[in-house]
Image: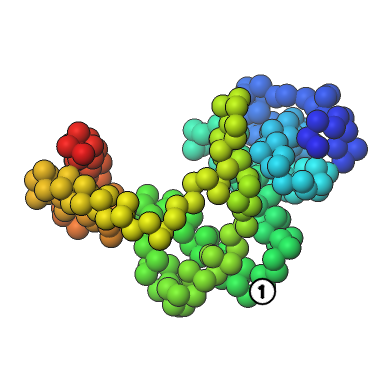
Amino acid sequence: MIKKVEICGVNTSKLPVLSNEEKEKLFIKIKQGDMEARRTFINGNLKLVLSVIKRFNNRNENVDDLFQVGCIGLIKAVDNFDLTQNVLFSTYAVPMIIGEIRRYLRDNNAIRVSRSLRDIAYKVLQVRERKMAEENKEPSIDEIAKELGITKEEISYALDAIQEPVSLYEPVYNDGGDSLFIMDQVSDTKNIDENWVEDIAINEGLKKLNDRERMIIRKRFFDGKTQMEVADEIGISQAQVSRLEKTALLRMKKNL
């Protein structure tokens, strides 16, 4: 699918590539309202869109549609990029292109999701992204629910609804031999003996830790809190939490 040369009337084998210096010069002109510079900048980054849509090669989607949607993400990235942030344009643009394509795939999913649910999910994702940018930490579901004035259950339901369905026969690994499929990684919850032994091993490993390490491991992996949240609770830096967590996990692994 992605190997076709002409996509949306564009000969992809002849797409121009801009150097970083050229991009900077063009971007200065773009900020001054130069539409021709904007057009040149977009054309010079179409290969970026082409590289991103290759990630969706196994979706059997129309490549022309994906390319057009990816171009929308590229244009949004151009219009919102801040040259003063000292970040490569490609680093900023790729997540926006991917996000635009994923939204398109969700909205055109064969499993129909109500518009109201999608709206809630997108608002949740927007709040999450904004808070992460402003506070440099993952917001809790309580914080998002409070800001949007909805319940935690509504948030969970909305986010679950927009998840893309995955085939059990989708390969996740191939080393040149037999492929490993998702269904191979699905455990049998009826086999409680394995879980019982695992629980014992984890509890024994926790006993080998000191009080602070044990508390950090429990908050991180049992309570599902971020390193920043744990750091705030116990009054140390996020870097210290990260270091203590790493040490504790290595000690548990050694003892296990």
Question: Quadrant location of the C terminus?
Answer: top left
Label 1, on which residue? Answer: 114
**Quadrant, the N terminus:** top right
Q: Residue at left 73%, top 24%?
A: 17
- The image quadrant of residue 47 is top right
Q: Residue 195's x, y, as percent?
A: 31, 54
Who's the residue at 36% across and 52% down the image? 137
At 17% from the left and 45% from the top, the residue drawn is: 205
Is residue 155 among the parts visible in the rendering? yes
Residue 116 locus on image (x, y percent)? 63, 75
Q: What type is the residue that disc 1 sits on?
A: Ser
In the depicted structure, whether residue 158 falls above or below residue 167: below
Count how many numbered circles sit on residues in the image. 1
Q: Residue furthest right?
A: 9
Q: Secondary structure at mark 1?
A: loop
Whether 119 is drawn above or below 206: the answer is: below
Q: Give the x, y percent position of residue 98.
A: 63, 45
- Where 53 sits versus 194, above or below? above
- Residue, x 62% and y 57% (percent of image)? 164
